[in-house]
């Protein structure tokens, strides 16, 4: 699903992680946190998730303590690199065709900007952002994001699979096949990427 063109135009500025985006997307300092999602067990993430990132929030159904956007905003201000919350925010934005989900403080791309500023070495954030950019039709930006994600976590099957999808969208079949084979070697279970490459005549064995 793609956002309407006039909505897309409003997101161009936010792909930058420089000073301009910093001013627009706010400081990372928060009254609680910011906490690193990767340090679960070392820091208390549950106090945030238990109130603001319930299963219904994650599914994009409704908020728990306030509006859906309010709970996602609280979660991502407290835990900027919460990849699952970022994925939910992106999903709601695409579903409702809004670059700024109601009751959030910033447009969606700001939350990715903040996550990258907070944890530039977090491959899950880069990959989630890459998927969002791909859904917006921003193929080159998505490929760049997945390239970094793979560099940070080269043995992750899901990241390789989604990187392959991005390269396939770009019609860079060699790299799409490379990441597909890596993903399947690492045990990724879904055949979709392989089947698309077979259909394009860019695979060297039959699809199952």
Image (cartoon, helix red, strand yellow):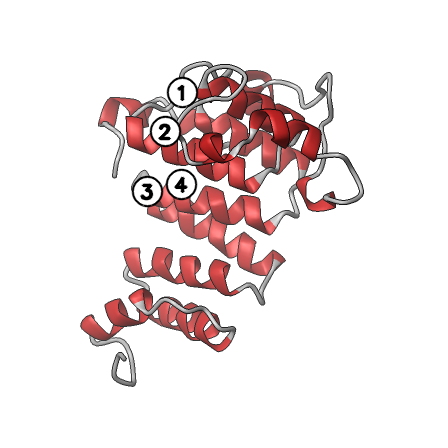
Where is residue 35, by image quadrant? Answer: top right
- Per the image, label 3 sits on a secondary structure element best described as helix
Q: Residues within 10 Å of mark 3 (few under 14, many from 20)?
A: some
Q: Is residue 106 visible?
A: no
- The mark nearer the N terminus, 4 or 1, is 1
- Image quarter where the C terminus lies is bottom left
Q: According to the image, label 4 marks what residue?
A: 132
Mark 4 vs mark 3, CA separation in Å: 5 Å
Q: Residues within 10 Å of mark 2 (few under 14, many from 20)?
A: many
Q: According to the image, label 1 marks what residue?
A: 100
Q: Is residue 95 visible?
A: yes
Callout 2 touching callout 1 (CB < 8 Å):
yes
Q: Nearer the viewer, residue 35 or 203?
A: 35
Compared with residue 79, is residue 184 higher up or lower down, i.e. above or below?
A: below
- Per the image, label 2 sits on a secondary structure element best described as helix
Whole-percent x and y of residue 75? 59, 27
Residue at image position (34%, 47%) is 139
In the rendered view, does 79 fall on the left or right side of 59?
Answer: right
- The mark nearer the N terminus, 3 or 1, is 1
Q: Residues within 10 Å of mark 1 (few under 14, many from 20)?
A: many
- Per the image, label 4 sits on a secondary structure element best described as helix
The image's mark for residue 135 is: 3
The image's mark for residue 93 is: 2
């Amino acid at each position: 699903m793609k956002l309407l063109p006039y909505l897309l135009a409003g997101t161009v500025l936010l792909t930058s992680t420089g000073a301009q985006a910093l001013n627009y997307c706010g400081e990372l300092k928060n009254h609680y946190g910011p906490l690193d999602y990767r340090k679960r067990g070392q820091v208390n993430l549950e106090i945030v998730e238990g109130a603001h990132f319930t299963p219904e929030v994650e599914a994009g159904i409704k908020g728990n303590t306030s509006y859906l956007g309010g709970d996602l905003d609280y979660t991502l201000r407290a835990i900027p690199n919460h990849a699952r919350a970022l994925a939910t925010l992106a999903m709601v934005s695409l579903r409702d065709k809004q670059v700024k989900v109601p009751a959030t403080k910033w447009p969606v791309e700001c939350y990715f900007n903040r996550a990258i500023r907070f944890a530039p070495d977090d491959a899950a954030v880069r990959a989630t952002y890459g998927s969002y950019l791909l859904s917006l039709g921003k193929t080159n930006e998505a490929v760049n994001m997945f390239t970094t994600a793979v560099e940070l976590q080269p043995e992750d099957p899901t990241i390789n699979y989604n990187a392959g999808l991005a390269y396939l969208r770009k019609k860079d079949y060699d790299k799409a096949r490379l990441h597909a084979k890596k993903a399947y070697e690492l045990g990724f279970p879904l055949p979709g990427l392989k089947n698309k490459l077979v259909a394009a005549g860019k695979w060297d064995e039959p699809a199952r």
